[in-house]
Image (cartoon, grey):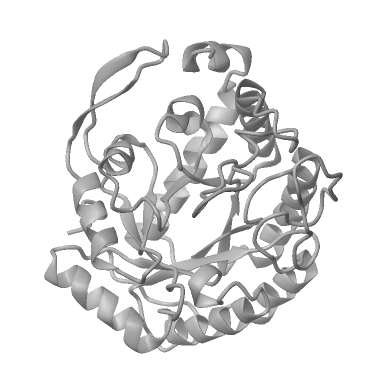
Amino acid sequence: MLSPFLLQKQLPLRAKQEETLASMRSTVKNILLGADPRIPIVLGPCSIHSVEGALLYAEKLAKLQEEVKESFYLVMRVYVEKARTTLGWKGLLYDPFLDGTNAIESGLFLSRKLLLSLLDLGVPTAMEFVNPLTASYLKDLITWGFIGARTSSSQCHREIASSLAFPVGFKNSIDGNVETAIQGIIASREAQNFLGIDKDGQIASLTSLGNPYSHLVLRGSTTTPNYDRKSVQKAINLQNEMGIHSRVLIDCAHGNSQKNPLQQKAVFKDVMEQIEEGESSILGFMLESFLEHGKQLFTLGDETSPSLSITDPCLNFEETRLLLLENRLLMKIDLPLFLENGR
């Protein structure tokens, strides 16, 4: 495998792109701290399977951002790794040609090239880090990171999160356990010493400074949602008991919608009502959204539509756009300023 240094040398972050990224990261951090009153929405397909489709969605998202910029700050899901409960296609990074050839080096190249293109479009990006090694290749291009429901309890994922220079959300586990995610947040905020790879791709002893911008994501469980008022307050109280006072992101998909894309709209509206009622501990939203509604059946080697998800079903773009336009806040919400260390 080529090293992170060599991949970055082939596809470097240019000065203008670096400036754009710094501004995006600063905006998200200010939102987490309460210094920017806008509501962040992390939205996009369940997983990226087509560069063509991703770029078309990003172009539409950039235009939508202009329409809703007073109320919302939009960050695109660019999930090039797909976490699997058992088996299945693992994402663009692992199998970019969707045929079982598992050309990982090509997947890394395509993933990095896509992220650079999105910076040129002015679109902030979010990524879930399924394999901790991925961060070494792509972390210099990301605005917001996430640790998924299957890995929030993983020590090596907590260590990687502690080393990243941008906010990282920890999701509650698949069975609905919130405490595990909060424990991950606590661990990621502290300095860590751990094994990883350096820029030359060599196994190395690494030291992190800790990530003060790690936070909780409520995504429901396999059987029940946790976006309602009672569940949100329970999660906030548990955070406070464990010494964490940062804000909470609500995932409208997954367990909170039981993977019914239309149910995401009901979740979104319910949580917006909580925000309008003065619940300042809610940070914002995550939505699974793409160009077309639903998903397509897929097996390795099939021809696929670039505009329809091949993993979880999504809201189509027009449904997404109308949802945001119809639920823009007509008033400014006064937010308490959260301490930078989140405590």
Image coords of residue 101 (percent x, y) = 70, 28
Query: In the image, what residue occupies the spot 83% across and 44% down?
Result: 302
Nearest the eye: 117 or 29: 117
Q: Is residue 62 visible?
A: yes
Vertical side of 261 occupied by 42: above or below: above
Image coords of residue 288 (percent x, y) = 62, 63
- Label count reads 0
Image coords of residue 86 (percent x, y) = 51, 52
Image coords of residue 117 (percent x, y) = 69, 33
Q: Is residue 330 visible?
A: no
Query: In the image, what residue occupies the spot 56% across and 47% down?
Result: 82
If the image is split into quadrants, where does the C terminus sit? bottom left
Query: In the image, what residue occupies the spot 48% across and 29% down?
Result: 140
Vertical side of 79 occupied by 323: above or below: below
Vertical side of 68 occupied by 25: above or below: above
Left or right, 131 with respect to 90, comes to left
Query: Looking at the rendering, which quadrant does residue 224 occupy?
Result: bottom left
Vertical side of 217 occupied by 50: above or below: above
Q: Residue furthest front?
A: 86
Query: In the image, what residue occupies the spot 46% across and 73% down?
Result: 222
Nearest the eye: 281 or 4: 4
